[in-house]
Image (cartoon, rainbow, N blue to C red):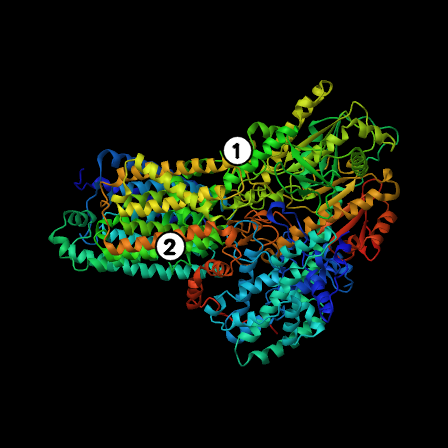
């Protein structure tokens, strides 16, 4: 689905600009999107380049952005010294790349000899940098700063009360308007910029064309050059790219990123015209030759080749560790009718579920836990009460199929609450304009400022939140209790829609028979305070939101007698004594809440009480396990310490999120039951013997595996190059436009994860491995799906993820080594 | 009021000494475990708070307390505990507890956390000494020390180029400020033959020959005003303030809530002198009033939360200096304390703005941009003000300075009413806005009265300012009126090309910072690029 998105047909416009447009769009497609903070989902920052091999992307990013795509040699040598990477791993990695004659010892000798030398990594030159070199003044940085300043205003989602950018115009037109007014370049010593900007053409493509022609860039060297320009503003480019993503899902097109590229090109042109230096033209001509050479030479540098090999060896060491987990312990599912479980609990595949599931199974005999994407196959959008827009609650690859309204269960009450919420919002806006307004802020602070003294203390001690919870904002306490997504009612789901959703979800979960009396669907979310990246800790399968809404809608549908009746025609018989329940796993505190307890029939009360007790026990055990990793002293009350973290406004590590993720397993739970996977594995329940025509396997490979690969590569890239693909130091974060963060007072928008989410101050909490996808499925079926889906094939063929198969006894038997070849693991 | 100097008053400097000691320890042993060092400095924080509370109680019960002077009378060492210093000490102590507690968690895992906490300790020690100094010499030393220790915090991440640049600009402005303060101290010391604040204040209180013969009074006033302006990031030296988010959030909280206040504090501390110096006061009204306008308007167009807060602080400092120039010193102190708590909270909670983004989907009634309705909003605000002024028995017409402050309050509360009255929303919301406006007015009058009661004994009484200052005040109020009305009409004016151009100029702070950047050589390349082959 995502490939189609990129190959969407280009709008054709008359004249010569057609080719240029196609060319520029192709470069833009190299930039992976980033989501706004309120729905901050994990994105693979290499996404636009996954059609290329890992090594060539590493080489390319080194040239265009000075990016690091591996750890430093010194860090690998430390891993070798600690024995985490063995000579055997290195030998194997050498073997894989065909370096047969080289032994691990010889290789390491060379690596050690080269380690101290300064790395030779030529960068793609731009005109701005050339101008900086000849004049000694960094005009390229000035250009970046001016564009970033404009972008901050242009993309602002309501922070500034008086936005200083023409947001009603397209990006290029808006920027051009500003460039004709902004005196900063002149003040900084670059005369004539406003005049030159005013002379720029109205059409962004014409401006780009003029710039490219005047810079004398041919078609061969353009691609790297343009890519380098975009990477100079990588964060803002990624945000612009997200607009294209959204437009693409709806079948449309968006030119924000294309225009941003034209803006950056126009600045190159402005610099070429306005930087008066006799040597500039000549130096640029030299640099063009460098550019041409870099464009033609696609091989990675020697130092990079070594580091890539060391990374291969590092990943092999992780696979060695994983292999020990799968020593053919799988009890094949009994052919005769299995015993009916007491309770079934469906958790998100998220690595954080693994800890809770393990402890729950240990304390609850007869409990079966199931792993499935946390939106439970219900691709909905949720429209909060009184809001005008709905937000997607499904993986970002999907366009939500249904909009569910949040309500209180009574239309009259809903409209009353809506009125109240809007009224409060209206009054709140007046108060904000008083508090933040020019001049009026003086009248605010004198009389009202003292009220912040008690608040300072209650917030500091976790008794209150700095701002009220947005989901409960403007609603009475009694209403908050009633607030729920309404699957019924005027905006609800019709019976045929319900049946289709229920069937799809149950089939994909491999849950089509042997239902327990209680089936708990567990959505998950986090609870943190004052954390700009809070949504990054929520459910990725729900688009960076808490998954409880999906669970609640799914439960309402699956408990619907009409739906159960219809499902019987498809051979899915849900016993009448089976009750579906919705819950929410708080991943920060390991608390588990179950919804609609007042609607539980008395027949299930006893079972429910037992379940709640077990969930409480499992939560305590999970907290105790996580507390160790959070560095909470063993002699403190871990329950209280973990809870306090979730309410602490100064806490930069409320939980570890998905740090450490290294494997994705799609197999029956029996293959992993009883193993301590350390909260580092995505677990998807899958039984290939139930999967006729392998439709479920196809779904798993094209959706959850891709999501997991995005998460894994986000962590990977943020770890190995936090400057470019991570968001830096959390203590310096400055939220801009309510959509993203910059580090310090400005500059490029930051993408990816903060350093504090990856590193505990002593060591990396996310060892940068590429994801190991482990399936229990017939090889032929897997191969067929790889053939059909380029995007999945690229993941494995190009070295972004690894693919392994379990045999029928659950042992790790085969590893895919690319281009349709497999290596048996003996 | 007992004013016999006593040695026990030196005890008020003990907590500051404790912080300095811890700061020194952290500098000496930067690798001592941060968790343990954090506990120590928290203990110091709580001890300081207890001491400040005790100090406040003593002041309330027994009035001003003065210590003996150690060393030469001009540059000696003495402490002074009066309503002003006790108030600000208590404020700093409260903030310190919250900010240090925040820093302990926030920087957990940073390998240099001990260094960070130590530098915080040193800075707190300096600023607290500045507040409690009873002598010009100690005051000056603490003034310089505050700036130098703050500098170490601003470049806590020395590898950040932008941090170094901002800190450099701050450093230069601060040294100019030091020179000004030094000049003022020398003028005062050489004329009165002492650095003892009480002796100088007495001389001004009694007036007569001692003051009349002070030929450098005008110069001293100007130097003091300049020192305060340079310390508190007034135009055109505001640039560094909006750029020092290059250092962890708690430093911003401490800076904006604690240290920036040194400017207004200096002016109020030495108000007996400034009150007699028309030139200095006029300069404060002019520059403070202008910065208040520029920075609070620039704040409107800032898309990033911390930069907006930076402009906001510059604006508030401008406002306080202006009010000080008008001679309403208790109002300055009320504003100073209230602003500190507000701003500390705003910085420490700045990560929460994303929550606000989640509420933005609620549709709100459209604004009309109707001029009569905007005028009516201001009319209601004026009425609310008049009613409460009457109820409190204040006749602002008797006190032109209070009239100016009152006019600014009216403009402010008009901003609560206009967004509801000038919209298609329900009337109940307008009624609610009017109620809120009244609440603000009540809070204003009672708190102003409280501040007056607390401080009138030690600060010069508000008198009718001389004509040049009145004229400037009128100019400021009219400018502010223009800014508020423009803002109220933004819904209809936002497409006006001239206004758009102004939004760009204002967002860039009228380019004053770019000019300083150029002087600082911010674009200079120190090393020729070696990336290219």
The reply to whether the C-beta atoms of the residues labelled 1 and 2 are less than 8 Å apart is no
| Residue closer to the observer: A92 or A194 | A194
Query: Could you tell me residue B252's position as x and y percent?
Result: 44, 50
Instruction: Tell me the chain of label 2.
Output: B
| Label 2: which secondary element | helix
Write the residue at 55% across / 35% down.
A474
Query: Could you tell me residue A179's position as x and y percent?
Result: 54, 65
Quarter of image, res B101: top left
Instruction: Find the distance from the CA under tag 1 to the CA under tag 2.
Output: 59 Å
Furthest-left residue in this view:
B209
Write the residue at 55% across / 68% down.
A140
| In-image side of A39 versus A806 (left or right) | left
Circle 1 residues within 10 Å: few <14, some 14–19, many ≥20:
few
Query: Could you tell me residue A666's position as x and y percent?
Result: 78, 42
| Label 1: which secondary element | loop
| Residue closer to the observer: B18 or A63 | A63
Quarter of image, res A605: top right
Observer able to see residue B35: no
Circle 2 residues within 10 Å: few <14, some 14–19, many ≥20:
some
Q: What numbered label is drawn on residue A521?
A: none
| In-image side of A734 versus A573 (left or right) | left
Residue bearing the label numbered 1: A636
Observer able to see residue A587: yes
Query: Could you tell me residue A21's position as x and y percent?
Result: 71, 66
Write the residue at 51% across / 65% down.
A181
Instruction: Tell me the chain of label 1.
Output: A
Furthest-front residue in this view:
B372
| In-image side of B460 versus A753 (left or right) | left
| In-image side of B417 versus A308 (left or right) | left
Residue bearing the label numbered 2: B479
């Amino acid at each position: 689905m995502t490939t189609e998105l990129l190959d969407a047909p280009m709008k054709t416009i008359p004249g010569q600009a057609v080719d240029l447009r196609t060319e520029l769009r192709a470069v833009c497609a190299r930039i992976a999107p980033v989501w706004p903070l309120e729905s901050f989902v994990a994105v693979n920052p290499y996404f636009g380049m996954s059609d290329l091999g890992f090594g060539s992307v590493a080489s390319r990013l080194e040239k265009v952005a000075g990016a690091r795509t591996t750890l430093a040699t010194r860090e690998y040598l430390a891993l070798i010294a600690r024995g985490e990477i063995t000579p055997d791993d290195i030998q194997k990695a050498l073997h894989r790349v065909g370096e047969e004659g080289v032994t691990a010892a010889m290789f390491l000798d060379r690596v050690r000899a080269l380690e101290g030398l300064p790395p030779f990594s030529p960068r793609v030159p731009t005109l701005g940098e050339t101008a900086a070199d000849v004049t000694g003044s960094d005009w390229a940085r000035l250009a970046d700063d001016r564009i970033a300043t404009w972008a901050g205003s242009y993309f602002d989602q309501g922070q500034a009360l008086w936005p200083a950018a023409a947001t009603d115009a397209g990006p290029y037109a808006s920027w051009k308007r500003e460039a004709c007014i902004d005196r900063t370049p002149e003040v900084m010593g670059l005369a004539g910029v406003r005049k030159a900007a005013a002379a720029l053409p109205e059409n962004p493509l014409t401006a780009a064309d003029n710039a490219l022609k005047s810079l004398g860039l041919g078609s061969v060297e353009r691609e790297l050059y343009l890519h380098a320009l975009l990477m100079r503003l990588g964060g803002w480019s990624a945000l612009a790219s997200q607009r294209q993503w959204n437009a693409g899902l709806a079948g449309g097109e968006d030119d924000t990123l294309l225009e941003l590229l034209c803006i950056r090109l126009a600045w190159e042109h402005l610099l070429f015209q306005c930087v008066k230096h006799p040597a500039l033209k000549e130096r640029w001509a030299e640099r063009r030759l460098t550019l041409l050479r870099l464009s033609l030479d696609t091989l990675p540098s020697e130092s990079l080749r070594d580091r890539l090999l060391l990374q291969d060896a590092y990943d092999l060491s992780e696979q060695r560790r994983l292999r020990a987990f799968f020593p053919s312990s799988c009890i094949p599912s009994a052919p005769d009718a299995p015993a009916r479980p007491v309770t079934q609990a469906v958790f998100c595949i998220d690595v954080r579920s693994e800890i809770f599931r393990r402890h729950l199974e240990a304390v609850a005999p007869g409990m079966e836990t199931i792993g499935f994407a946390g939106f439970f196959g219900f691709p909905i959008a949720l429209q909060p009460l009184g809001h005008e827009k709905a937000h997607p609650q499904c993986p970002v690859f999907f366009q939500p199929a249904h909009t569910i309204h949040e309500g209180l269960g009574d239309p009259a009450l809903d409209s009353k609450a809506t009125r109240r919420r809007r009224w409060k919002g209206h009054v709140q806006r007046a108060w904000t304009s008083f508090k933040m307004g020019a001049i009026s802020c003086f009248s605010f602070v004198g009389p009202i400022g003292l009220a912040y003294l008690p608040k300072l203390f209650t917030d500091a001690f976790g008794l209150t939140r700095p701002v009220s919870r947005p989901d409960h904002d403007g609603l009475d306490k009694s209403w908050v209790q009633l607030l729920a997504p309404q699957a019924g009612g005027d905006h609800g789901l019709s019976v045929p829609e319900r049946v289709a959703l229920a069937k799809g979800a149950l089939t994909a979960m491999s849950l089509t028979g042997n239902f327990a009396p209680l089936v708990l669907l567990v959505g998950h979310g986090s609870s943190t305070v004052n954390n700009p990246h809070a949504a990054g800790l929520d459910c990725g399968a729900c688009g960076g939101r808490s998954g409880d809404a999906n669970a609640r809608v799914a439960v309402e549908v699956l408990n619907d007698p009409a739906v159960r009746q219809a499902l019987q025609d498809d051979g899915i018989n849900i016993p009448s004594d089976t009750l579906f329940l919705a819950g929410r796993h708080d991943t920060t505190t390991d608390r588990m809440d179950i919804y609609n307890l007042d609607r539980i029939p008395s027949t299930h009360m006893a079972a429910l009480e037992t379940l709640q007790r077990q969930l409480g026990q499992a939560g305590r055990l999970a907290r105790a396990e996580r507390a160790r990793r959070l560095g909470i002293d063993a002699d403190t009350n871990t329950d209280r310490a973990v809870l306090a973290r979730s309410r602490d406004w100064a806490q930069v590590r409320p939980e570890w999120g998905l740090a450490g993720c290294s494997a994705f397993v799609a197999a029956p739970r029996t293959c992993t039951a009883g193993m301590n996977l350390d909260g580092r594995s995505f677990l998807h329940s899958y039984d290939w013997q139930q999967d006729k025509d392998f439709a479920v396997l196809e779904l798993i490979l094209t959706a959850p595996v891709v999501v997991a690969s995005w998460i894994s590569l986000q962590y990977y890239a943020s770890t190995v190059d936090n400057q470019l693909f991570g968001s830096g130091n959390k203590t310096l974060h400055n939220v801009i436009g309510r959509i993203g963060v910059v580090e310090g007072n400005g500059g490029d928008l930051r993408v990816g994860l903060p350093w504090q989410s990856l590193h505990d101050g002593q060591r990396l909490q996310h060892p940068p491995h590429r994801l190991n996808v482990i399936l229990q499925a017939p090889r032929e079926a897997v191969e067929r799906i790889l053939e059909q889906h380029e995007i999945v094939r690229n993941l494995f063929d190009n070295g972004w993820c690894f693919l392994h198969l379990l045999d029928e006894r659950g042992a790790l038997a085969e590893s895919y080594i690319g281009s349709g070849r497999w290596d048996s693991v003996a | 009021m007992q004013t016999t100097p006593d040695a026990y008053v030196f005890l008020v400097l003990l907590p500051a000494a404790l912080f300095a000691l811890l700061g020194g320890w952290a500098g000496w042993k930067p690798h001592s475990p941060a968790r343990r060092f954090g506990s120590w400095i928290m203990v110091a924080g709580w001890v300081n708070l207890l001491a400040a509370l005790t100090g406040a109680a003593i002041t309330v019960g027994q009035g001003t307390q003065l210590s003996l002077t150690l060393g030469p009378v001009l540059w000696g060492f003495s402490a002074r505990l009066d309503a002003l210093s006790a108030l600000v000490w208590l404020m700093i102590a409260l903030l310190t507890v919250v900010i240090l507690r925040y820093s302990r968690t926030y920087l957990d895992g940073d390998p240099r956390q001990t260094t960070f906490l130590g530098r915080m300790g040193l800075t707190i020690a300096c600023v607290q000494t500045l507040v409690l100094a009873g002598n010009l010499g100690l005051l000056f030393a603490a003034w310089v020390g505050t700036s130098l220790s703050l500098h170490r915090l601003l470049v806590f991440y020395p590898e950040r180029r932008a941090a170094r640049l901002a800190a450099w600009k701050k450093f230069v402005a601060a040294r100019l400020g030091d020179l000004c303060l030094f000049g003022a101290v020398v003028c005062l010391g050489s004329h009165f033959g002492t650095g003892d604040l009480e002796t100088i204040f007495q001389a001004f209180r009694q007036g007569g020959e001692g003051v009349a013969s002070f030929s450098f009074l005008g110069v001293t006033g100007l130097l003091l005003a300049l020192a305060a302006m340079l310390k508190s990031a007034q135009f055109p030296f505001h640039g560094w303030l909006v750029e020092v988010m290059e250092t962890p959030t708690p430093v911003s909280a401490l800076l904006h809530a604690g240290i920036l206040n040194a400017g207004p504090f200096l002016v109020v501390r030495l108000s007996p002198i400034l009150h007699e110096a028309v030139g200095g006061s006029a300069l404060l009204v002019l520059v403070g009033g202008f910065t208040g306008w520029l920075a609070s308007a620039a704040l409107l167009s800032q898309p990033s939360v911390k930069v907006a807060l930076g402009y906001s602080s510059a604006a508030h400092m401008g406002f306080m200096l202006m009010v000080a120039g008008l001679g309403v010193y208790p109002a300055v102190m009320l504003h100073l304390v209230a602003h500190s708590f507000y701003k500390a909270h705003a910085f420490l909670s700045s990560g929460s703005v994303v929550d606000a983004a989640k509420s933005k989907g609620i549709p709100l009634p459209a604004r009309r941009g109707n001029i009569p309705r905007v005028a009516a909003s201001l009319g209601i605000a004026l009425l609310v003000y008049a009613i409460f002024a009457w109820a409190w028995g204040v006749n602002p017409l008797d006190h032109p300075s209070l009239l100016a402050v009152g006019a600014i309050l009216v403009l402010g509360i008009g901003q609560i009413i206009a967004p509801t009255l000038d919209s298609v929303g329900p009337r109940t919301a307008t009624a609610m806005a009017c109620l809120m406006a009244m609440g603000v007015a009540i809070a204003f009058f009672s708190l102003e009265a409280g501040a007056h009661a607390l401080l009138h004994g030690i600060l010069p009484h508000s008198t009718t300012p001389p004509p040049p200052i009145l004229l400037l005040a009128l100019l400021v109020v009219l400018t502010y009126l223009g800014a508020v009305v423009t803002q109220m009409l933004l819904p209809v004016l936002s497409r006006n090309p001239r206004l758009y151009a102004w939004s760009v100029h204002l967002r860039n702070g009228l380019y004053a910072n770019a000019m300083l950047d150029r002087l600082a050589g911010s674009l200079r390349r120190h090393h020729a690029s070696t990336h290219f082959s």
